[in-house]
Image (cartoon, helix red, strand yellow):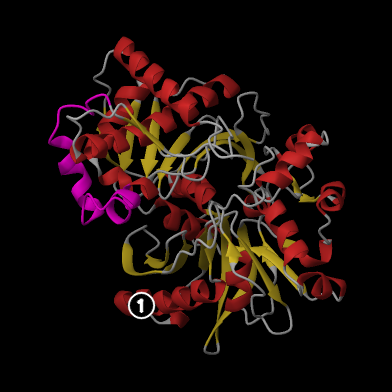
Amino acid sequence: MTPILAIDQGTTSSRAIVFSEKGHILGIGQREFAQHFPHSGWVEHDATEIWTTQRTVIDEALAKAAVKASEIAAIGITNQRETTVAWDADTGKPICNAIVWQDRRTAGHCDALREAGHAALFQRKTGLVLDAYFSGTKMAWILENVPSARQLASKGKLRLGTIDSWLIWNLTEGQSFVTDPSNASRTLLFNIHTNDWDDELLALLEIPRSALAAIVPSSGVAANANFSGVNIPIAGIAGDQQAALFGQGCHTKGMAKNTYGTGCFMLMNTGENAVPSKAKLLTTTAWQLTGHAQHYALEGSVFIAGALVQWLRDGLQIVQSAGEIEALAESVPDAGGVVVVPAFVGLGAPHWDSYARGTILGLTRGTTRAHIARAALEAIAFQSAEVLTAMQADSGIALNELRVDGGATANNLLMQFQADILGVNVVRPKVLETTAIGAAYLAGLGVGVFTSPADIARQWQEDRVFTPNMSRDEAATRMAKWSKAVERAKGWQDA
């Protein structure tokens, strides 16, 4: 047996999973950590808590797997992508809370850049739209608003990184400051065509190159983690959605997956071609294997999906656990005309409206919590359907199946409704931990445990196929009502 450790650092929890070379789970550790909301539209994490919880769950996973650190062949890291950490290179301590990908504080900065005529430049070079979602304006905000940031930068001591860089810095005890192209491509600072930080974009955002991590391949030995004197190669690095695409075996052009996590993220592999989007999708780096050209993907990012279920549990308190949602929603035949638009932090693809806010429409005296629960599940599917429509228009590829993963795929009602609205088969794999296993596969490939992506793809197995049952006319009527509701939610928050 050749165990591989996957570090899966997410938006709400830190996890670690030990996989066998056959893709079997040997041990899992998971810890939630605090979410901080200091102002309306702001979302922060304590980066020190992220590292502490991550280190704890690594030990838990190894213990459950009955595997010693010295037996681990390689480490793969996957992470929430656009969340930004700033720290002092000398002390290794964060200089402020991490700014989470959901945070909207830099929407005004993005507006100003658009008004100055820079939107086309950013999209051409980075494949991204100008939005507060991405890391670049977060980094600029830190430099402008955290007192010590500019001073540290002037001395070459400031480190601005995404979560992968922060974890690797700690795993290597400050010896390595690196990131891979998939994470770098989410910053608004990385030229996806030259595979490097872009000086023109750095100048526009006033971010020094010295504060940014070195770029290394997504698969290949990038650094060595130190576990009490035991060195383990870190050989896989990828943002969570690109890792899931790889883990789902979507290694060839035209294959697509959708991950149902805190948000929903649909990616289509476009091969070695960076396909520009006309439908407000993102063109992003999928991965770069050592010795190979980059692979690209089209991506549609939905900000709120599983987080909507969390809100029903913690905010509205209409259920005590997320697992109750399916049974509650199934207790009514339909949503009773209710539509939920979960624009809690604005709308992502294909709308990109930072000022939209959440709405519940169609309420009557007959509306119950069951109707709201069902409408919430339907909202997740509607948002994904909008993205797939845009993706097919951009790529010219009509999908005949969508591979799905993430916690919400256990909800059969949601998956069936997703197939009904899309009009294509929705395929759930046997191994739902596709983000973590994608990181493990990249790491294993990087140290020779696997010989090729084809070797990895053969391990993928389907669990269940959800076949569309709804007529296309009915689906179109449902989507039209959804679109009407979305229009009501747009532009609610004042700029």
Query: What residue sits 25% from the left and 40% below the top?
Result: 373
x, y percentage for residue 116? 83, 36
Mark 1 burial class by Cα count in 10 Å: few <14, some 14-19, many 20+:
some
> Can the viewer see residue 260?
yes
Q: Is residue 226 magenta?
A: no
Task: Name the residue at the bottom extreme.
Answer: 229
In this rendering, the answer to whether 370 lies above or below 188 is: above
Is 48 located above or below residue 39 in the figure? below
Q: Residue furthest left?
A: 331
Q: Which residues are magenta?
A: 309-337
Front residue of 153/282: it is 153
The residue shown at (71%, 52%) is 137
Identify residue type, mark 1: Glu
> Which of the two residues, 14 or 460, is positioned nearer the viewer here?
14
Horizontally, residue 119 falls left or right of residue 471, namely right
Q: Residue at x 57, y 71 (%)?
A: 167
Quarter placement of the C terminus: top right
Instruction: Give x and y (percent) for residue 374.
Output: 24, 35
Q: Kindly state the secondary structure of the residue where label 1 is placed.
A: helix
> Label 1: which residue?
60
Q: Where does the image place residue 415, in percent across and percent down from the top left?
A: 29, 35
Residue 214 is left or right of residue 353, and the answer is right
